[in-house]
């Protein structure tokens, strides 16, 4: 019986479990993990199957990294910046304040040394990470009261996590860690004064417009937050090489799929929010400036005590400088011309 | 002997040829096709192999669509707007004047109905198209003389192709069709006065800075030009479903790879060009305005005589309006804040 093993070796059947950090209701961000698993199965004639579990089904959404590290699941779909409590260096895989936009993050990851730096760092957590989605620049969130000056931020209890929360602390904000489903009642009751989530399409689903009128932009703490597939490194190394490649390609497909889906869906959601009375407002220039300075203070403090963070930051900062310089030339000029044409109702 | 056919059916060996529209020297744009073939082979254990041929090796670069249509090759890697001579509707697959940026093109293609519309159109050419790369917004090109007013464009012999060339004609430019390798000597001798190609990384390789001092931006005729894999539709339908999926995923990988590579490489090239004496300049506002109006005239004229073009344009235009409206909110605001920080040397 030579046949059976030869076939098996040709395309072995592999069944994995993926723990997502996201609830099923968020069809774009949860959908990126689901899409990855779907197109991977399709490309391997259903031989490499990954079953996707929503946040809480196997482990809570914010424990995906641990579940991957200790082998509870073979892989996860998450945002690495959820784990800044372990080490703030995690954040570079997703987004850091005043960082890269979605395309610049791709450039850093794929051709700027970012993936190599991050996977070197992730090794000690037994994680192999593959970029698998991006939301695009996020909104600054929902506020019950208008923010006119930097002073107005003092004492504001805001649902905002991790590294960005630490920057906000420097401005007097009191950051709160609240899971997605609990934000609405907290905002309604006034337990919190503000909350950031993602953008119009997701925020509308959670109904924040009903309990907070002011919707600010931009979310300067996540200009292009990347999602990642985290794979237990031993499980990764056990895969046949061509399944590793198939996994990488499936992640690439889900990556573009998710940004494109957000971009396609956000305009309608934003129109509906504004029609429902939402007051769409940019953060005042002085708030942006103070936030930028506070972020730089936090970077300096974090680098002083964390050499791993410093190693990534130094390389990343130089890359960011070059990227923004380049985008200033043709991308921004083109986008700004189109924006003016839109403002003049010429499109 | 049950073994051999069973294995063969499990992962059949398929060898295809791909005709690229690009020369090997352009490692990013040619590289996108090459990368697609490479990661497809890797993900199929080298069972689905595509050999990539540079422009001119099997067919000239601008005859890739024909070669795919008539089955000379199974597939090609090209920019659909090269074929506007057949029908201007081809251009929407790549870029049209004052169109979508790279991310917006993804949104239109993947979640905005673009792929469905384009593949319906491509059917009569026996082509199944898969997005496979993007250059990002291109530069406006190299000019021997400064362009201060719309008048200055009159009589300028410019290497610029297709639909954009027709818009330029309305401004008095005399468009020239010249293959990549012949642009430099034409510009040097003064046979032409201006030439557009791609952006700093590719343009530097061709040495245009040595023969034309003024480097304008933005290339308003291609704000996010997409490359596509063209597959002969019969060959596509003959593929096992899972090889179709593997092909799609490989294209997705090459897609992000190419934009990221341009973004990562352009800054250094631009610095070097400017250091060599290149005068980097935005098109004057009046030139942009006149170009925008000329493009709208051409759209109206083309729609009046081409119902296929009109069908795509009407759907696409509504989508563009919504995209730019949305980008005005958070993406542009974030990018412009970062641009100002860069201009103030704060990054």
Image (spheres, coloured by chain):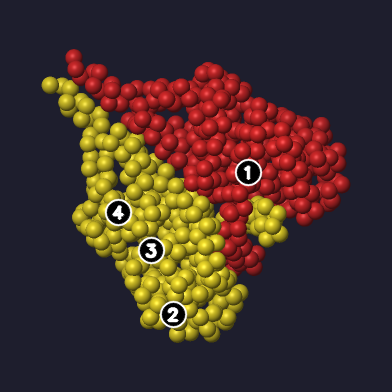
Chain colours: A yellow, B red
Q: Chain for mark 3?
A: A
Asked if both marks, 1 and 3, belong to the same chain, the answer given is: no
Cα distance between the residues tagged 1 and 3: 41 Å
Name which quarter of the figure residue B180 lies in.
Answer: top right
The chain letter under disc 1 is B
Query: At numbered mark 4, what does the secondary structure look like: helix, strand or loop?
Result: strand
Cα distance, mark 1 to mark 2? 43 Å
Q: Is residue A247 left or right of residue A271?
A: left
Secondary-structure class at tag 1: helix
Which of B329/A266 is in front? Answer: A266
Q: Secondary structure at mark 2?
A: loop
Q: Which percent across, then down, holds residue B177?
A: 73, 30
Mark 2 vs 4, N-terminal side:
4
Marks 1 and 2 close (CB-CB < 8 Å): no
**Extreme-left residue of the structure:** A1
Disc 1 or disc 2, which is closer to the eye? 1
- Residues at marks 2 and 4 touching, judged by CB atoms closer than 8 Å: no
Contact between labelled residues 2 and 3, with CB atoms less than 8 Å apart:
no
The chain under label 4 reads A
Mark nearest the camera among 3 and 2 is 2
Residue sitting at x 55%, y 67%:
A274
Q: Which residue is mark 2?
A: A193
Give the residue number, with chain letter if any, for mark 4. A76
- As drawn, is B38 to the left or to the right of B326? left
Give the Cα distance between marks 4 and 3: 14 Å
Which element type, helix, strand or loop, lies under badge 3? helix
Quadrant of residue A281 within the rendered picture: bottom right
Q: Which residue is pictured at 47% across the width and 39% down the height?
A: B254
């Amino acid at each position: 019986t030579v046949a059976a093993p030869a076939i098996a070796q040709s395309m072995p059947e592999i069944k994995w479990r993926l723990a997502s950090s996201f609830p099923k209701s968020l069809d774009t961000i949860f959908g990126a993990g689901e899409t990855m698993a779907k197109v991977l199965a399709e490309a391997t004639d259903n031989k490499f199957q990954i079953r996707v579990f929503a946040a809480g089904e196997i482990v809570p959404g914010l424990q995906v990294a641990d579940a991957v590290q200790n082998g509870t699941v073979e892989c996860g779909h998450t945002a690495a910046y959820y784990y800044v409590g372990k080490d703030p260096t995690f954040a570079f895989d997703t987004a850091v304040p005043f960082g890269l936009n979605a395309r610049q993050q791709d450039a850093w990851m794929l051709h700027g040394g970012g993936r190599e730096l991050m996977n070197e760092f992730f090794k000690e957590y037994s994680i192999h990470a593959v970029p698998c989605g991006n939301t695009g620049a996020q909104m600054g969130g929902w506020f019950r009261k208008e923010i006119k000056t930097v002073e107005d931020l003092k004492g504001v209890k805001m649902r905002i996590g991790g590294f960005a929360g630490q920057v906000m602390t420097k401005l007097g904000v009191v950051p709160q860690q609240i899971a997605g489903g609990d934000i609405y009642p907290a905002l309604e009751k006034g337990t919190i004064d503000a909350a950031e989530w993602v953008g119009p399409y997701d925020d509308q689903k959670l109904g924040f417009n009903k309990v907070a009128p002011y919707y600010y932009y931009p979310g300067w703490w996540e200009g292009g937050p990347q999602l990642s597939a985290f794979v237990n490194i031993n499980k990764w190394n056990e895969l046949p090489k061509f399944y590793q490649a198939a996994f990488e390609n499936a992640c690439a497909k889900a990556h573009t799929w998710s940004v494109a889906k957000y971009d396609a869906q956000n305009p309608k959601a934003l129109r509906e929010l504004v029609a429902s009375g939402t007051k769409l407002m940019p953060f005042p220039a002085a708030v942006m400036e103070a936030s930028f300075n506070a972020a730089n203070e936090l970077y300096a403090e974090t680098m002083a005590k964390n050499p791993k963070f410093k190693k990534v930051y130094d390389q990343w900062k130089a890359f960011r400088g070059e990227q923004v310089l380049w985008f200033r030339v043709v991308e921004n000029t083109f986008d700004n011309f189109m924006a003016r044409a839109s403002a003049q109702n010429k499109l």
